[in-house]
Image (spheres, helix red, strand yellow):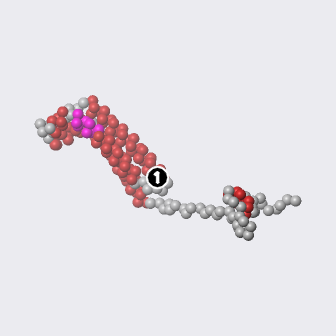
Amino acid sequence: MTDPRPRPQYGEYATPQEQAKAVGASAPHFGHAIPPASPPTYSAPPAAKTTPRRWDLVLSTALLAYGLINVFSGFFQFSDLGRLIDGVYATQGVGQFTPTSLSATLGIVINASNVVLWIATAFVTVRLLRRQKLAFYVPLIGGAVASIVAASCLMVLLFSDPAFSAYLNGRG
């Protein structure tokens, strides 16, 4: 004869002794019956708040646009670092900048790093915005890193120039 009831899955039809054996505990004493265990009930975690933040979208887009403008304007500024630094020297009374091959190389490094950093920043920002996560801080970090790279390259170029060294030593 077949049993029409579904086959037990979680020990709902087990005796107290069988339940104790399954969990590795000693069998209960007679007279102290353990009620049959009910299957655990699980509830889904509360849904995360996914309200779109329009201010984040607007701010992130504005910061990316500002960064793109800086990348494009940097092409003209950093493509000829010798002329740029010579203009700064003239306004500050430092002396005459001596362009070297390092000037052109560092200009290329600054322009290439600006492009790569902007693309990476835009990629991460768009991914965060699509997931409706905060994203405005990513363009800020990308801009800070690009500024640090450019400033480092400019410092290397300035400190290798004899006119700037003489100016710092008070002989310029």
As drawn, the residue found furthest toward the top would be 101
Please give the name of the residue rendered at 39% of the width and 41% of the height, measured from the top-left corner: 116
**Residue 96 location in percent, x, y?**
16, 35
Is the N terminus in the top left, top right, bottom left or bottom right quadrant? Answer: bottom right
Q: Quadrant of residue 53?
A: bottom left
The magenta-colored residue range is 153-160
The number of numbered discs placed on residues in the rendered structure image is 1
**Residue 172 location in percent, x, y?**
12, 37
Say what amino acid the circle numbered 1 marks. Answer: Leu
Q: Quadrant of residue 33?
A: bottom right
59 with respect to 169 (left or right) = right
Please give the name of the residue rendered at 73% of the width and 63% of the height, measured from the top-left corner: 16
> 136 or 31: nearer the eye?
31
As drawn, the residue found furthest toward the front would be 29
Q: Quadrant of residue 41?
A: bottom right
51 with respect to 111 (left or right) = right
Judge the density around disc 1: few (<14), some (14-19), many (≥20) Cα neighbours within 10 Å. some
**Residue 70 location in percent, x, y?**
32, 46
Q: Is residue 95 magenta?
A: no
**Residue 14 location in percent, x, y?**
75, 61
As drawn, the residue found furthest toward the left would be 171
Please give the name of the residue rendered at 85% of the width and 59% of the height, measured from the top-left corner: 2
Q: Is residue 159 magenta?
A: yes
Which structural element holds mark 1? helix
Please give the name of the residue rendered at 43% of the width and 56% of the height, measured from the top-left corner: 134
Can residue 76 be seen here? The reply is: no
Looking at the magenta stretch, what is its main secondary structure? Answer: helix
13 with respect to 77 (left or right) = right
Residue annotated with mark 1? 128
Can residue 8 be seen here? The reply is: yes
